[in-house]
Amino acid sequence: MTSIGIIGTGKMGSGLGRVWAAAGHQVFFGSRDADKAKALAAEVGAGLQGGTFEQAAEFGDIVLLCVPGFTAEETAQELANVVRGKALIDLTNVMSQTGFGLFVGTTTSMAEIIAHHTGAKVVKAFNTIHVLNLANPVIDGLRADVYYCGDDDTAKSLTKQLIIDAGFEPVDCGPLQAARYLEPLAGLWIHLAFGMGGKRETAFKLLGR
């Protein structure tokens, strides 16, 4: 059982919190509006807790950062003293709010920026998964992939287990620098699912012999 502090109570944060709680983990929801997080925890039940971002970060053996991408750097800086040295999953995406393009990329990634600001053991993961797939990660008989990368083996091991516990197939993509590839991959998913009129319940799968 792992203690998980979730920074953000949007669809993905609340969805993963529900899934992990059902798998037996301890979950603390954090929000800028502590009452909102407490209400969510009470709704989910199972002994979950809610409070501020800082309280959630302090609670977790591992912290999930799932705020909007354009607030991720600022939020990470605010929590730096609390998450320093901790395992932290960065779920955020860096897609432009105005359409095509990334507001971070090529020579760095949001995950690397967060690691720089916080000193946390950052792992990029879950950024290519849509909330609709949390209820059923198996599509046409294949388990959807969650690609993850990071520089700390212990943090990656914790993340891998949480990926499995959420019902997905973990795919290790190497060091944190590989987030420079994973972050644009979320943009491709968004483009296919929304811009090209595709389906929301789609996911990527790495196949090989």
Image (cartoon, rainbow, N blue to C red):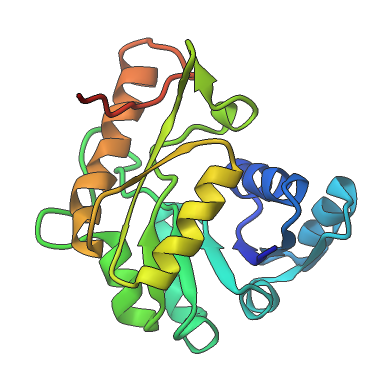
**Tally of marks:** 0
Residue 133 at what x, y percent from top left? 55, 27
Is 137 displayed left or right of 152 in the figure?
right
Residue at 49% from the left image edge and 79% from the top image edge? 86
Residue 90 at what x, y percent from top left? 42, 59
Residue at 64% from the left image edge and 65% from the top image edge? 4
Quarter of the picture holding the C terminus: top left
Is residue 36 visible in the rendered image? The answer is yes
Q: Residue 116: which quarter of the image? A: bottom left
- Up-down relation of residue 95 to residue 40 (above or below): above
- Up-down relation of residue 208 to residue 32 (above or below): above
Residue 17 at what x, y percent from top left? 68, 50
Quarter of the picture holding the N terminus: bottom right
In this view, the residue farthest toward the bottom is: 81
Is 76 displayed left or right of 60 in the figure?
left
- Up-down relation of residue 54 to residue 65 (above or below): below
Residue at 72% from the left image edge and 47% from the top image edge? 23
In this view, the residue farthest toward the left is: 107
Residue at 51% from the left image edge and 81% from the top image edge? 83
Is residue 73 visible in the rendered image? The answer is no
Residue 14 at what x, y percent from top left? 68, 47
- Up-down relation of residue 152 to residue 166 (above or below): below
Q: Residue 124: which quarter of the image? A: bottom left
